[in-house]
Amino acid sequence: MDFAFTSEQEMIRGQAAEFLRRECPMNLVRRVMASEHGQSDELWGGMAALGWMGLVFPEEYGGAGLGFVELAIVLEEMGRALAPGAYFSTVLLGGLALMEAANEEQKQRWLVPLAAGKLKATLALSEAEERFGPEGIALKAERRDGGFVLNGTKLFVPDAHLADLIICAARTSGASKTDEGVTLFAIDRACDGLKLTPLKTMDETRRLYEVSFEQARVAPDCALGNAGGGWPVIAKILDLAAIGLCAEMVGGARRVLEMCVEYLKTRVQFGRPIGGFQALQHRTADMLLLVESAKSAVYAAACAAGDNSSETPLLAAIAKAYTSDAYAWIAGEGIQLHGGMGFTWEHDAHLYFKRAKADEIAFGDATHHRARVAEMIGLTREAGIPDQEKVDQEKVRSAG
């Protein structure tokens, strides 16, 4: 079995790496972090010129019609460069939501300009309930005067200040805490009754916002797909977004490893490079093992996503569970191996550490996805797995 990339995929990787090396150096990343805008318009324009916004969308909507593996390759290089801006929220969240849920007229209206880099989008999903399932969606969308009126608050919405279009999950019918009655709406950021509040975040290369709706009126043609049938689309997007984020994480982890190897080769202590000490060699070897293992998990999931395989949810959960832990540990080791210098603002190690910690919990942390894996392989309480709390209580009663 051939696990190598095709010549076309290697060309995409090389092009992405060269473009980001030239157009997204770390001094640009730091400038964007310090800016109010949180985006480099020049970098965005360059990515649009390369066709990255439409990479996975069909040609009839202005896309390149490539697969999810090609997208993962680009995302890996973006993670390696810590590329700032709204690419992830626009393509992985907003764009895929439109591709999966919108009707033909809506795709022509929104997906075509998005694929051309002329429209930015994001997805507003999380709420105060802090759940990744349908039970976490409480924002109400009531039918009124032929349209909808939205009331409620969304949290942790990425790049909402840059998005022209905010795709929001709301309840139009059905009981709360079920997957029935969840509808996706495509809402103009300038909509009356919509308010953005910036949230303080660890990773300043990405901005998160609270988005509140107070009597926000939405036209009926802004509802994506069938009213009340939005949850299956959301579940699929969450899996695809998790895979894409894992590809970025692999790129970041790879860059941390490279920085450590470069430093260990040049830092001299006791008359020789510290890379010659076995303890440090073993630590970097462990980092490489984690990078390669995470990469294997990510591209297995990306292949499944590209084939629309039924195994995609399981492989996405495996990749996110493993990569969340791996990147966080590698980024921490990156600071430790650089010694005191790794803690300074001037060094880049802390930027990767912050990104790793932010990515660790985005779209579910390792604990959440391990629970998903266990459920998908049949290890549930309903399947005969004992409730540990009840087991412990029974032990206490027996001892008494």
Image (cartoon, helix red, strand yellow):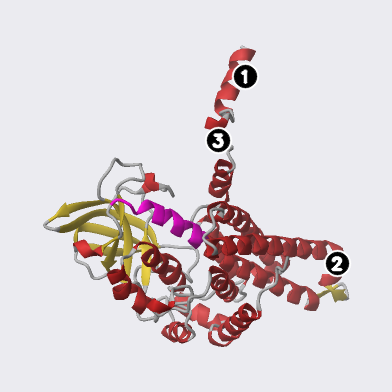
Magenta part mainly helix, strand or loop? helix
Q: Is residue 231 left or right of residue 26?
A: left
Give the secondary structure at mark 3: loop
> How many residues crowd around disc 2 within 10 Å: few (fewer than 14), some, or many (20 or more)?
few
Q: Amino acid at mark 2?
A: Phe
User: Nearer the viewer's eye, disc 2 or disc 1?
Assistant: 1
Residue on which the image places disc 2: 277
Q: Quadrant of the C terminus?
A: top right
Give the secondary structure at mark 1: helix
Q: Which residues are magenta?
A: 228-242
Q: Position of residue 352 (x, y in %)?
A: 59, 68
Q: Amino acid at mark 3?
A: Thr
Residue on which the image places disc 3: 380
| Mark 2–mark 3 CB contact (< 8 Å) | no
Give the secondary structure at mark 2: loop
Q: Position of residue 237 (x, y in %)?
A: 44, 59
Q: Position of residue 380 (x, y in %)?
A: 55, 35
Looking at the rendered structure, which numbered label has been put on residue 75?
none
The residue at the point 60 percent across, 85 percent down is: 18
Nearest to N terminus: mark 3 or mark 1 = 3
The one of 43 and 332 positioned closer to us in this rendering: 43
Quadrant of residue 389 within the rendered picture: top right
Tell me how far mark 2 sits from mark 3, CA to CA.
46 Å
Residue on which the image places disc 1: 395
Nearest to N terminus: mark 2 or mark 3 = 2
Tell me how far mark 3 sits from mark 1, CA to CA.
21 Å
